[in-house]
Amino acid sequence: MPTVTLGALAGNFGRDLDRCVAKSVGIIEAAARDGVDLLVFPHATLGGYLGDLRDPSPDALPPALDPDGPELAAITAAAGDMTICIGYTEAGDGARYNTAVCLTGDGVLGVHRKVHQPVDEPAHYGAGAHFRAFDTPVGRLGMLIDYDKTFPESARSLALDGAQVVATLSAWPASVTDRAARLPADRQSRLFDLYDCARAAENQLFVVASNQTGVMGALRFLGQAKVVGPGGEILAATRSKGGLALAEVDIGAEITRSRRVLDHLGERRPETYTTSTAPERTPPCA
């Protein structure tokens, strides 16, 4: 495969659906002029994210969209040959889901519903049940949403399913309990970058990480969109500002080179790993 240009977006997207769609289409058109092959939007691009992680009001939740509705249809129409990953709140199966969809102008290539739900999300959203990779024009790809990337098993599941690229779509805020005066000093800022780099290095693949910027309710989002190489090195980044991080890479060649001596997937010892799904909890002290 020839070199491709991977793009990770940091941007602010709120509740105004018409504005979100129009802004997304404009970004797609600009990215096409820049020769972008894969464009990863933040989570909750269409309709915004929660304004509070702790007991959000049901009246303040993002709008739940029909996957076959006009919003995603407009993104598909604009996509053309570009592969696009974009996040929204999905209305499906009688529940709401934090969902990411990957598509081109020819239609949907893959869908991921957020599996790991922090704080009070489970009270308002259904949870996804699997991690699956799928084929795209830029290579085999998998998606994670927000908190999913905190868990090494998430990206590892995609890598074992053949993913060469993992798109991590986020609406990741600064700490809600111990916020720093400056975003770069916030502990969540450090963790957000750490998870992206670790997931790439552990699995020797590319991570294309997007994020929201700005403020929604009580949450202040970090930005820090980036493209990470299979050695865990950040190839391009926006830091805390809005913008598009771009990296031109040869996906197959770079992954092959990273695995030439040390092949993390091939040298695993699954028979030695615990299969317990839930650690035994230690009772609290009296």
Image: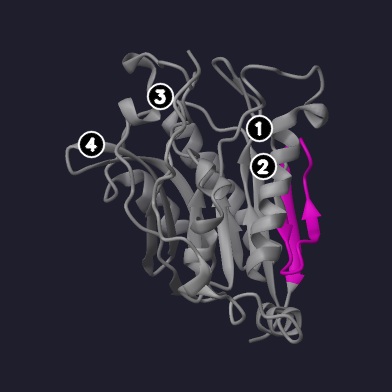
State the residue position of label 4.
Answer: 95
Instruction: Tell me which numbered mark, 4 or 1, is placed earlier along the sequence.
Output: 4
Secondary structure of the residue carrying tag 2 is strand
The disc placed on residue 10 is 2
* Residue 77 screen position, x and y as percent: 42, 58
Specify whether 40 is left or right of 157: right
Q: Quadrant of the N terminus?
A: bottom right
Verify CB contact (< 8 Å) between mark 2 and mark 4: no
Of marks 3 and 2, the one in the foreground:
3
- Relative vertical location of residue 52 with respect to residue 104 in this rendering, above or below: above
Q: Nearer the viewer, residue 6 or 184?
A: 184
Gap in angstroms between the C-alphas marked 2 and 1 = 6 Å
The label nearer to you, 1 versus 3, is 3
Q: Type of residue at label 3?
A: Asp
Instruction: Kindly identify the residue that appears in the image at 49 percent across and 66 percent down.
Output: 158
Identify the mark at residue 213; answer none if there is no mark. 1
| Residue at the image point whose x is 79% and y is 56% from the top | 236
> Which mark is nearer the camera, 3 or 4?
3
Q: Is residue 241 above or below residue 36?
A: above
- Asked whether 182 or 269 is in front, the reply is 269
Instruction: Name the residue type under label 2.
Output: Ala
Q: Which mark is residue 163?
A: none
The residues tagged by marks 2 and 4 sit, at their Cα atoms, a distance apart of 28 Å
Q: Locate residue 212 relative to residue 87 in the image: left or right.
A: right
Q: Is residue 225 above or below residue 173?
A: below
Q: Is mark 2 in CB contact (under 8 Å) with mark 1?
A: yes
Q: Which residue is mark 3?
A: 120
The magenta span reads: 227-248
Q: Measuring 72% from the left and 52% from the top, which residue is drawn there?
A: 226
Label 2 packing within 10 angstroms: few (<14), some (14-19), many (20+): many
Residue type of the residue flagged with mark 4: Ala
User: Is the residue marked by circle 4 packed among few (<14), some (14-19), or many (20+) residues within 10 Å?
Assistant: few
